[in-house]
Amino acid sequence: MGRAPCCDKASVKKGPWSPEEDAKLKAYIEEHGTGGNWIALPQKIGLKRCGKSCRLRWLNYLRPNIKHGDFTEEEEHIICSLYISIGSRWSIIAAQLPGRTDNDIKNYWNTKLKKKLLGKRAPSRRSRATTHQDPYQLSTAAAAGGDMCSTSSVNNNNNAMATQALSASALERIQLHMRLQQGLYGAFGGAAATPQQWPKLETLLTSKQLQLPATEPVDAVATTVTVQQPPHHHVIDDHHSLAAGREAVEAEQLGSTSTGGGAYSMPCSFERPNKLVGFSSPSSAAATEAEVAASGLTVNGGYGGAGGFGTHHDEIYDFLYKYGSVGAGAHGGHIPASLPELQCPDSAAAIIGADEKFSTWTADASCDYGQLQGNHISGNLHDYALGGYDQ
DNA sequence: AAAGCGCACAACCGCACGATA
DNA sequence: TTATCGTGCGGTTGTGCGCTT
């Protein structure tokens, strides 16, 4: 049985708000506040609108000090840094930008900033509706289907396609991160010849350019946590095992180095600050931990992702934490300068479109990936970032 | 001139979570 | 402990405008 609708959809007005409606809502809230009940509010003031619609209208357009358009370079920097770090948590990103709404930022990102930074065109809705499936559709389908990637098999076409499609989202952030780190495209008007170091999240935090929620202890940034894989949707046996991951982290902690071509340890193998985990509900995290323990899959590393920033974002964050700029990491927080140009894997190209470049990570790259060198990082990262996670 | 297309923005939808009875 | 409800969020869709063909 589904959930009861929040309002009688037959009797509420939909579509654009009229000036009269705006005036009614604004006047009432300015005088009485919301009363803590958006659902009841429209009846009180005689609006034939859904309470949720009223809330949205107020938050996005009517409340004081709302800014629209004209995003500054500084704001773009913050949006990008946070997007790389935490993904599409627009409300959190919006909290760092006074006067901006999550909806505004989301729209700005989707329509302008993403294209500006990645040089890719979002597929039009028309083409999406009438042509072959693209990564965006597949992501949606996967999310709606819930378990398109839920089995351990990634060999059938559907799952392979879904996994590839999901990688577009995951790898997009990594690619964005790298491009910005390397100043490849002179984003924001910067000269490509003088690579611009993208500000580390920590830098933004310490310089007070960003403010984490007040509930988040400052020292959480340096705190590591024991986290766990989600109890379901694992694709682990194609390349590695959780045990291998555990062994790898133990080896890493002992200061030993793994051999090239050996079991790679990217998943489940490194510490990460819990600043993101801190947004999770302790109860839900505990529940997940208990479930994992019951399933016998408990390991060091990885992340349950119950609440907080979600599994998908956390995996990317974990990767960037070790190899990117969101943490000290094994490479001092910097992507190796010799990282090769990123190309779209053939299989993904068929879906994404040959003119779009997506990240892949090749074994023959000359860059130093430390213990990852010599491994087929492409497949591993790909599966790592996406395998079995139901984002 | 008209149709098609791309784009930006506003709004809606459904889900997840927390609070509370 | 469980069911219900309100809220918040992220993804998606609707719509109008301007440009191109």
Image (tube, coloured by chain):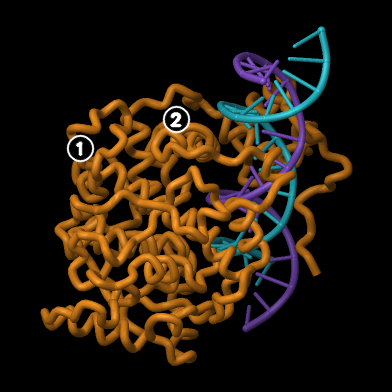
Chain colours: A orange, B cyan, C purple
Q: Which mark is residue A234?
A: none
Q: Residue at x 56, y 76 (%)?
A: A155
For numbered disc 2, what is the local secondary structure?
Answer: loop
Give left or right: position of A188 versus A140.
Answer: left
Tags 2 and 1 both on a single chain: yes
Disc 2: CA contacts within 10 A as few (<14), some (14-19) or many (>=20): some
Q: Report whether B2 appears left or right of A100.
A: right
Residue carrying label 2: A99
* Label 2: chain letter: A
Residue A195 disc label: 1
**Residue plotted at (48% across, 91% down):** A294
Relative side of A58 to A272, left or right? right
**In front: mark 2 or mark 1?**
1
Q: Considering only vertical position in the picture, is A108 above or below A370?
A: above
Give how far apart the Cα atoms at labels 2 and 1 are.
Answer: 31 Å
Residue type for callout 2: Gly
Q: Which of A67 and A265 is in front in this view?
A: A265
Q: Are marks 2 and 1 in contact (CB under 8 Å)?
A: no
Quarter of the picture containing the N terminus of chain A is bottom right
